[in-house]
Amino acid sequence: MTSSPEKAALRKHLLEKRDSTSFDLIEIHSQKIISKLMKTKVISEAKSIGCYYSIGSEVQTVELITHLLEEKKIVSLPRISNGMMSFRKIEDLTKLEKGEFDIPEPKDNAQVEEKHDVVLVPCVGLDNEGNRIGYGAGFYDKYLEKKNLIKIGLSYSKQIVKTIPISDGDVKMDWIITEKDVIKTS
């Protein structure tokens, strides 16, 4: 996926900003974000939820995944294979393996989940219109572009900017949840 110099510079700036956050603050903000997420009707009514396994300074999702599994939701995580992303069902977090980007992901024999009610999307930055900037590979945009499901961007409030430059193929988030706000964009 091509990225404009403006978008690349914004991504770099936002990643530096996010990565400079202390782990304690990441934990506190992540707990607030997950608490707000769990109180939404969208999540309580969802049967199948696509999640992401958090790495580094991303909004932390491991406790969320465990909680969703305990609630008997169908939970799936992304797996990257041959340049494409698919979501695979998981039963617990102990059966994951290191993927292409050293991110824990379901094994190749895990069942593909095609029908999600909601997909939670990692974000480097967002604007209030739901435009998202990710890591630049376009995996989520390609996966989500033709799907009829609710897309929720999880982000820290300091990652929300006035405008995100958009490119062809970018997919907007329907909801944004930060430690401060729940924003419905559509």
Image (cartoon, rainbow, N blue to C red):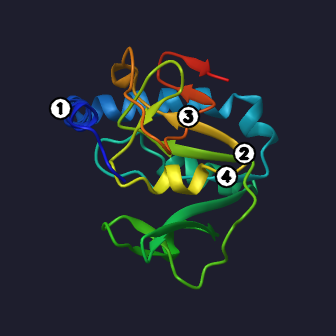
Name which residue lies at 51% across and 80% down. 107
Name which residue lies at 49% across and 72% down. 94
User: In the drawing, what numbered circle is on residue 146?
Assistant: 4
Which label's residue is closer to the chain start, 3 or 1?
A: 1
Residue type for callout 1:
Ser
- Please provide percent x and percent y for residue 156: 39, 27
User: In the drawing, what numbered circle is on residue 149?
Assistant: 2
Secondary element at tag 1: loop
Categorize mark 1 by other alpha carbons within 10 Å: few (<14), some (14-19), many (20+). few
Cα separation between marks 1 and 2: 33 Å
Query: As rendered, which of 142 and 102 lies closer to the eye?
Result: 142
Which quadrant would residue 73 be assigned to in this image? bottom right
User: In the drawing, what numbered circle is on residue 172?
Assistant: 3
Image-based side of 159 in relation to 79, left or right: left
Quadrant in the picture for the C terminus: top right
Cα separation between marks 3 and 2: 12 Å
Query: As rendered, which of 159 and 34 lies closer to the eye?
Result: 159
User: Would you name the residue on which mark 1 appears?
Assistant: 20
Residue 52 visible (yes or no): no
> Between tags 1 and 2, which lies in front?
2
Cα separation between marks 4 and 1: 35 Å
- Please provide percent x and percent y for residue 96: 47, 73
Secondary element at tag 4: loop
Residue type for callout 3:
Lys
Image-based side of 127 in relation to 69, left or right: left
